Amino acid sequence: MSCKKHRVALHVSAKQASAVLLRPHTNTYHHNITISSHLNTIQSLIMSSSQQTVVFNYDVSCPFAYIASTRVQSLAARTNTRLIYRPVLLGAIYRATAAPQGAAGSASDVFNPTKKAVGQASMCRTLKRYKIKYNPPSEHPRKSVNALRLLYCVDGDERVKLTEKLFEAYWVTGRDVTNTSVLLEIARECGIDGLSEDSFKDPGARKELESATAEAIERGAFGVPGFWIEGAKWRDASGEDRVGRFFWGQDRMHFVEATLLSLQSSTPWEDVPNLQALMPRCIPLPSYPTPTPKKTKLQFWYDFSSPWAFLGYTQVARLQRQFPGLEIEMKPFLLGILFREIGAPNMPMAAVSPTKAAWSRQDHADWCAWWNAMGGAREIGFQWADQFPIRTPTVLRVAIAEPGTAELLCEFVPVCKRRYGPNDDRLCLLGTQCQRLRRLRAARRSHERRLQWHRFDR
């Protein structure tokens, strides 16, 4: 069986619409019905041409792509988006982007034990949240090149159905997707006929897989799942205007949905209705704020040198609003020592591929934009330090000795390091002076309130 071509998006023009309306009618009895049918056809053509398009890149050997595959169709339905399934070869992406990986070809093989354990726990929470069946194979990763080539021998609904069955075979039922006989059997179970052993050698399928993989790499992919929003106009973290938006990861699908909705209404994220409902959560949204029957303590461990700790710190107040009984205990510590003890590089971003490092900066900017769009007490302002990473032992000592300075230092250090330099101890003086100023202002307000009550009593 020769492989079908990749489906091309449909666009309607005035000429096409005229051709539909002016089509000759030989049966006058059905003339009105025919006109109505043509109008419906034109309407469907116009709707299809105005739809946004998302290209879904995946490899059946990736568990996170499997999780995304269980949710991507509902996302497309909610946003009225045209969804294109475009499988890619994950191993080729790793090689092209010089991504660190183990001998078996898995990126997680190079993670230190602590990071691997945290990642697995996070994945278990995700599987539980979405009620996804998961029974990983004893040997992972398994070569998926033949399965991916087979997907390019079908198109449209057949590709979607076969994709779902292949993910199920790999991650649930434990079938051997490296065996071509098993792959053909799975295809027949999907109602797909005409495939044979020759399909795995089809030059068209092989070329299409290579082309899709190269295309994904050019768009910024360094892994899967990937989501490409065609035609999206936006400005990246460096201020450069771009067309077409790439998102990576099943845990960034709320970014994908928010972007699609904002493009449909030509509005920024903050004007998307019910934006907060797009964020995956463990409890229903209407129950916020959640009354806590007893006081609960949450320890927030941080180092001023971490841009992600800073981002987490900006959401501490939001957590306290949502859970009134929540008590936050600020726990400063030296991140460099933690990295050393668990066997992580002192600067993790230097240990990943350049493509992923660039994405990580953009991802941080996206999270800042997301939380700003959600609204809060104040806008998140963030600037990367001129020298990174920054040294923070002295300011961390100040935060331990004077816990009241922690909040101020969390705000000042990421910004002021650009002005004072990474090792300037004047930051500590700045933090303590600001803390004293805050106390003086609080005392002054208290004194003014007492004076007002004194005048009222008189």
Image (cartoon, helix red, strand yellow):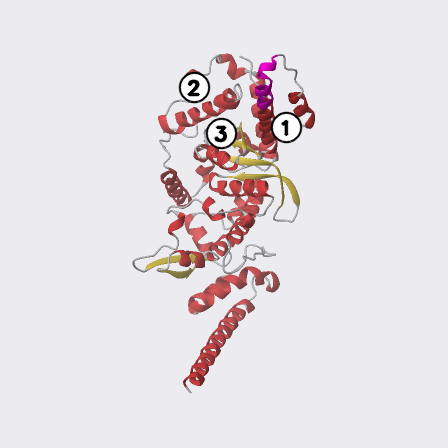
Mark 2 touches mark 1? (CB < 8 Å): no
Quadrant of residue 320 in the image? bottom left
Residue at mark 3: 59
Q: Secondary structure at mark 2?
A: loop
> Which one is earlier in the sequence, the residue at label 2 or at label 1?
1
Q: Residue at x 47, y 80 (%)?
A: 448
- Mainly helix, strand or loop, the magenta region? helix
Q: Residues within 10 Å of mark 3 (few under 14, many from 20)?
A: many
Q: Secondary structure at mark 3?
A: loop
Q: Secondary structure at mark 1?
A: loop
Vertical order, 370 against 400 (above or below): above
Q: Quadrant of the C terminus?
A: bottom left
Residue at mark 2: 190
> Which one is earlier in the sequence, the residue at label 1 or at label 3?
1
**Residues at marks 2 and 1, CA–CA distance in whole angstroms:** 30 Å
The answer to whether any part of residue 81 appears in the image is yes
Quick one: 46 or 285, which is closer to the camera? 46
Image location (x, y in percent) of residue 154: 52, 19
Q: Select label 1 or label 3 by which is in front.
A: 1
Q: Select label 2 or label 1 by which is in front.
A: 1
Image location (x, y in percent) of residue 323: 37, 56
Name the residue type under label 2.
Cys
Quick one: 21 or 437, which is closer to the camera? 21
Quadrant of residue 221 in the image? top right
Residue at mark 1: 11
Mark 1 touches mark 3? (CB < 8 Å): no
Name the residue type under label 1.
His
**Residue 28 located within the stretch drawn in magenta:** yes
Q: Which residues are magenta?
A: 27-37
**Residues at marks 1 and 3, CA–CA distance in whole angstroms:** 29 Å
